[in-house]
Image: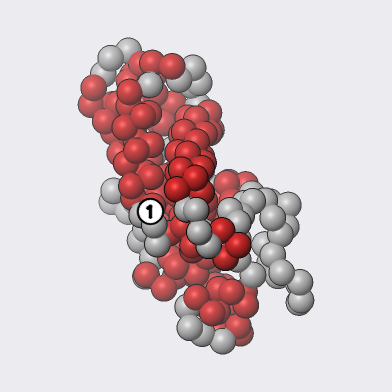
């Protein structure tokens, strides 16, 4: 299924606000994979074993459905920013709850990482240290279209992009997570990004008769 443009998302928002149930359901369904990517970006490895990203997505979708009348924006950018705020609130709630209930081993916990934090030192790496995951996505295309295109890639391509571009891990950590050498991880990432751009280009090309 081809992902819609920003203009089409705005049209879906307007129709949903006017009470069109089908447009509302379509609007939310289009954002599910995008929220899944954002959830992965916000959930550290120590937290991932305690909560599945899909649970955070489901909770966020339920709350967004419930509070849709409170959404005041009209564009894709405003819509996704609103969903991200709900998601971030749910992640923060879980972290607070976990820390209150975990009375032992606090010294061994890995702190919740600031998504804006830069990677480790060493050789220069492609991702700009001051760019957020959403900004990096927007350089390619609209965020929903990128999420849809990413879902078409092979699993190892998806994983390396998630680790590098969304979780913003240095390549040493990406290599460790994927059980590869650093050069192999970097090469895989470059191939994956090339395929992602090709998928987006194919999506933007007019269909042949």
Query: Which of the pair 12/117 is nearer the observer?
Result: 117
Q: Is residue 67 left or right of residue 192?
A: left
Position of residue 206 relative to residue 31, above or below, is below
Q: Is mark 1 on a helix, strand or loop?
A: loop
Q: Name the residue under label 1.
A: 51
- Identify the residue at horizontal 33%, vertical 19% (top origin): 15
* Residue 149 percent coordinates (x, y): 41, 55
Position of residue 59 relative to residue 164, above or below, is above
Position of residue 161 relative to residue 175, above or below, is above
Q: How is the image coloured?
A: secondary structure
Q: Which residue lies furthest to the left in this view?
A: 22
- Identify the residue at horizontal 69%, vertical 55% (top origin): 117
Q: Let me know if residue 72 appears in the view.
A: yes
Q: How crowded is mark 1: few (under 14 residues within 10 Å), some or many (20 or more)?
A: few
Query: Which of the pair 34/66 is nearer the observer?
Result: 66
Q: Is residue 118 left or right of residue 207?
A: right
Q: Let me know if residue 84 appears in the view.
A: no
* Residue 18 percent coordinates (x, y): 32, 12
- Identify the residue at horizontal 23%, vertical 22% (top origin): 21
Q: Which residue lies furthest to the front in this view?
A: 103
Q: In which quarter of the image is residue 113?
A: bottom right
* Residue 127 percent coordinates (x, y): 67, 62
């Amino acid at each position: 299924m081809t992902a819609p443009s920003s203009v089409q998302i705005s049209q879906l928002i307007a129709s949903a606000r006017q009470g069109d149930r089908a447009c509302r359901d379509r609007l939310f369904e289009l954002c599910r994979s995008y929220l899944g990517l954002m959830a992965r970006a916000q959930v550290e490895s120590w937290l991932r074993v305690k909560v599945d990203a899909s649970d955070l997505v489901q909770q966020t979708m339920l709350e967004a459905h419930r509070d849709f009348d409170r959404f005041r924006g009209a564009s894709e950018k405003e819509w996704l920013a609103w969903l991200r705020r709900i998601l971030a609130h749910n992640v923060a709630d879980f972290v607070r709850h976990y820390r209150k209930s975990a009375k032992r081993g606090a010294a061994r916990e890995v702190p919740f990482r600031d998504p804006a934090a830069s990677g480790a030192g060493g050789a220069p790496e492609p991702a700009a240290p001051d760019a957020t995951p959403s900004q990096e996505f927007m350089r390619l295309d609209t965020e929903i279209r990128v999420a849809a295109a990413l879902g078409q890639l092979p699993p190892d391509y998806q994983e390396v992009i998630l680790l590098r571009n969304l979780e913003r891990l240095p390549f040493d950590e990406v290599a460790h997570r994927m059980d590869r050498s650093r050069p192999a991880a970097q090469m895989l990432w470059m191939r994956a990004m090339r395929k992602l751009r090709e998928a987006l280009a194919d999506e933007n090309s007019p269909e042949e008769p």
